[in-house]
Image (spheres, rainbow, N blue to C red):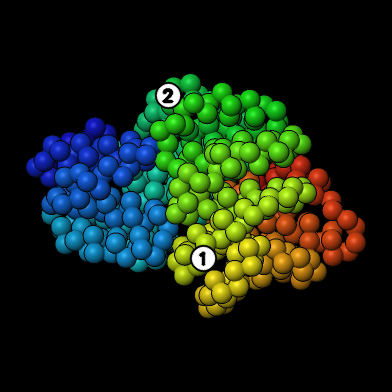
Amino acid sequence: MLTRANDLTLTTTSDAVVAAVDGLEAALLRYGRDVADYLASPAVGSDSAYALAAHAAIHLLALTAEGRARALPIVAAAGELAAGATEHEQMFVAAIAAWAQGNLRGAMARHMIIAERWPRDLLSAKILHFHQINTGEFAAMLASLRPIVAAQPDNHFVHGMHAFALEQCGDAAGAERAGRHAAALGCDPWAHHAVAHVLDTAGRFADGRAWLAGKADEWADCSSFMFTHNWWHAALFEIALDEPDAALAMFDSRVWGVRRDSVQDQLNAVSLLARLELVGVDVGGRWMDVAPHLARRVDDRANPFADLHFAYGLARAGDDAALARLIDGLGRGDPAVAKAAEGMIAHARRRYGRAASALKAVADVAIGFGGSHTQRRLIDLVAADAAARATDWGRVIAGPWRRRAPVAEATRRCAG
């Protein structure tokens, strides 16, 4: 057994494996492009159960069927080694195994135990953070970070995650303090992102534009997701400041085309194109450029939030064959997700009455679809636009576009 940089034990005799696992944790925390370096490291062929589970997690983070298929045999190998590992490592392996098997609740429960008992494991904490965003579990996110903040008060990545959780739970002042503190301590693109959320929710759009412009140079080495997602936020500020042409330029140069096969990049692209159209921008043939990449993902069933974006983008592009496969899969799953997809598709096809009715029916459960409240606001915007057009009120998108998440919504998100 050897000791990692975080003072936790790794069951291995190889210093190179320890270095690889530590490197992966650091790369995930800063959303670095070097996450993929782990796949060529000694860790992936090692006798460390934790290292193998981390390898599987990289594939699962892709949110694709191919990623799950690659992860399953790796998880099985990790499970065989887990008997000789520490209790902490066994818990981590069990969490990744539950994820690979589609049991997100089981995975999150195990990561929560790690957060409480081994709060220096930030690889586990970051994966838990990912799951909680994808399930709307923001009260649990905030709770899971309390022991981690207490154990690592000088770690800027911890403060960046804490800032995001605070913002999602309605504590804007606390989130801004934590996010700015994290950014002052070190390069932390997730902290930049958390502060952007605060400024967006508060309607401080000019401040948000300036904040992200001042941090953009620090994203050069980020993974495509963090790079494109922070630029997505920058584009939202441009739309809110009545500069949609600037937002469209950001779509072309910073949001779409960095890595077209990335699910997260695809979601950013769909969301930004939809929001641009909602404020009257002609996006030209861009839907047709995005749609073929969405079509490859319709059978993945990664999460409801992704499926709703796929539905909207495919409907706008008119790819009826791919859309039919997606609808068929959703029809065999959660009825609320299927109803939401019906609403998104109807709006994309300009059937506003049907869209308004379907989206109204799922308004109270949309938080469970996943995504941050800023991301889910797209559903609110589409619903408001559909309702306005269905009743001949005309486009009133300026109203819902500038509507901030109310305190009551934040309280509901983090009740308990």
Q: Where is residue 394 in the image (x, y as percent from the top left)?
A: 88, 56
Which residue does the image show at 52% across and 28% down from the upper left? 216
The quadrant of the image that shows the N terminus is: top left
Q: Residue flagged by tag 1: what amino acid is it?
A: Ala
* Labelled pair 2, 1 in contact (Cβ < 8 Å): no
Looking at the picture, does residue 277 appear above or below residue 77? Answer: above
Marks 2, 1: nearer the viewer: 1
Relative side of 171 to 292, left or right: right
User: In the displayed image of the protein, which residue is found farthest to the top?
Assistant: 184
255, 2: nearer the viewer: 255
Name the residue at 53% across, 26% down.
215
Percent of width and height locating residue 206: 70, 28
Q: What residue type is labelled 2?
A: Gly
Marks 2/1: CA distance? 39 Å
Task: Give the image location of residue 127, x and y in percent.
Answer: 39, 48
Count neighbours of disc 2 (C-alpha within 10 A) and say few if under 14, some if 14 to 19, many if 20 or more. few
Query: Helix or strand or loop: what does disc 1 sit on?
Result: helix
| Residue 3 vs residue 236, the one in the foreground | 236
Comes first in the chain, label 2 or label 1: 2
Label total for image? 2
Q: Name the residue under label 2.
A: 186
Question: Residue 71 is drawn in which quadrant?
Answer: bottom left
Provide the secondary structure element on which disc 2 rests: loop
Residue 140 in view (yes/no): no
As drawn, the residue found furthest toward the front would be 285
Position in image of residue 2 (x %, y %): 14, 38
Residue 229's label in the rendered image is none
Residue drawn 19% across and 61% down? 77
| Residue positioned 17% across, 42% down in the render | 17
Q: Which circle marks residue 295 in the picture?
A: 1
Whether 192 is drawn above or below 326: the answer is above
Q: In this rendering, would 17 be left or right of 290?
A: left
